[in-house]
Image (cartoon, rainbow, N blue to C red):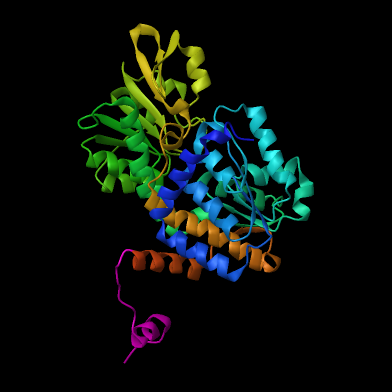
Amino acid sequence: MITDPALAPDGERKIDWASTWMPVMNRVRDRLKEEGVMRGRRVAVILPVEPKTAYLAATLADAGAEVAVSFPGVMVHDDVAAGLAARGVEVFARRGSTHEEELGFFEEVLARRPEVVIDDRADVIRLAHTTHPEVLETLLGASEETTTGVLTLRAMEADGTLKVPCIAANDARCKYLFDNRYGSGQSTVQAVLDNTNLLLAGRRLVVAGYGWVGKGVARRARGMGARVIVSEVDPFAALEAYHDGYDVMPIEEACEVADVVMTATGVRRALPLSAIERLKDGALLANTGAVDDEFDVAELRERALETRIVRPNVEEFKLEEGRSIFVIGAGVVVNLSAGEGHPVEIMDLTFSVQALSARHLLLNAAEMSPGVHALPDEIDEAIARDKLDTLGLRIDRLTDEQQAFLKAWEAFA
């Protein structure tokens, strides 16, 4: 269920380009093919359909897995979807699909009875636990890509409704330290600038949320000359932002002076309409968080006197007093709705985490209790060491004496 199979050659070229810059994933692919762990196993990949995700899905398929891919249409590249389908992967995704169609696509994936789900925002795992409980009979487990999804799974675990083991892939160090920080920092700021062709230097940019994503956005924006303000609800994160050299203030106060506002919270309505109404004429809004309505575009549309598309992926909302607010990427995670996502080299780490999480579940789910599990440290560290090796970098190792010191509790003579 893709838009046009004729787009496959362009998509395959993009997938090939991504594979060139993903050396750790190439090692993972070779290992999985040699081991045969994936052979004949059913895996669902619920991630934005773009070149790096496609290479993850193709890697699993090359290793012998039966792979089905789906995702909401605003984050689907039709040529990549076609290229992936041409490689023998079942793809249920097309740009511009309706919400009802997307639910149908997810149901198609669930009808394949996946043994492992690589999920995003826990979308498919929630469906399996609510409207499609029959899937749980053969589902071994899942790995979750996003901070928001991990929070959802922990909430399910807390109230006893989570019936399968789920690996918090987002919490792996090879994921959040690089993907959430450096990947989001570069790709989301770049998407805003590419789609507006405006200068960031000198502008006041408000980051709502100072988690790993917010830290990356703030760092990248400051490096390009923006004057950064952070808004937070967590006192520790606010203190950290202050000590990192940023101004800190409540979101409504920050919006009074903002030229650009980027939400990075993973929480609905983190930027309320009351704050948006304080923005100056010409302010830009973008969401870099995993929740689509971190600011309510529908509510803003209802409030506006008039709207129009002024550039691809940029919509103007004309408000009272002659003010205009510009929303980039329809309020959906901007680096994917209005860009090409994280840099390839960053996703080399993230998707190595995901591929090896799927492997770990296939081998060990029977011994894992229902609930949220960390990726084993030895897997996380092996990915980091492989990445260093592909970069030609070497590091030191602890001596036996140093290891003994770290493990001992007695006072040394």
Figure check: 382 above or below 173:
below
Quadrant for residue 100, please give it. Answer: top right
Q: Residue furthest bottom?
A: 413
State the quadrant of the C terminus: bottom left
Q: Residue at 67% of width from left, 34% of height from top?
A: 103
The residue shown at (60%, 65%) is: 360
Q: Position of residue 187 (x, y in %)?
A: 36, 41
Name which residue lies at 23% across and 38% down: 224
Residue nearest the observer in this picture, 245 or 214: 214
Left or right relative to 407: residue 60: right
Tell me the chief SS of the magenta region: loop
Residue 62 relative to residue 239: left or right: right
Residue 292 appears in the figure? no
Give the x, y percent position of residue 147.
Answer: 51, 47
Asked if residue 223 can be seen in this view, the reply is: yes
Q: Say if 227 sits above or below 342 in the image.
A: above
Q: Which x, y percent locates residue 7?
A: 51, 35
Is residue 204 rendered to the left or right of residue 7? left
Near-viewer residue (369 or 380): 380
From which residue to which does the magenta span run?
Answer: 391-413
Q: Is residue 117 magenta?
A: no
Residue 134 placement (x, y as % from top left): 79, 48
Name the quadrant of the N terminus.
Answer: top right
As for residue 401 lying within the magenta part, the answer is yes
Q: Nearer the viewer, residue 35 or 259?
A: 35
Say which quarter of the image contains residue 401: bottom left
Q: Camera-side residue: 55 or 395?
A: 55
Count of residue discs: 0
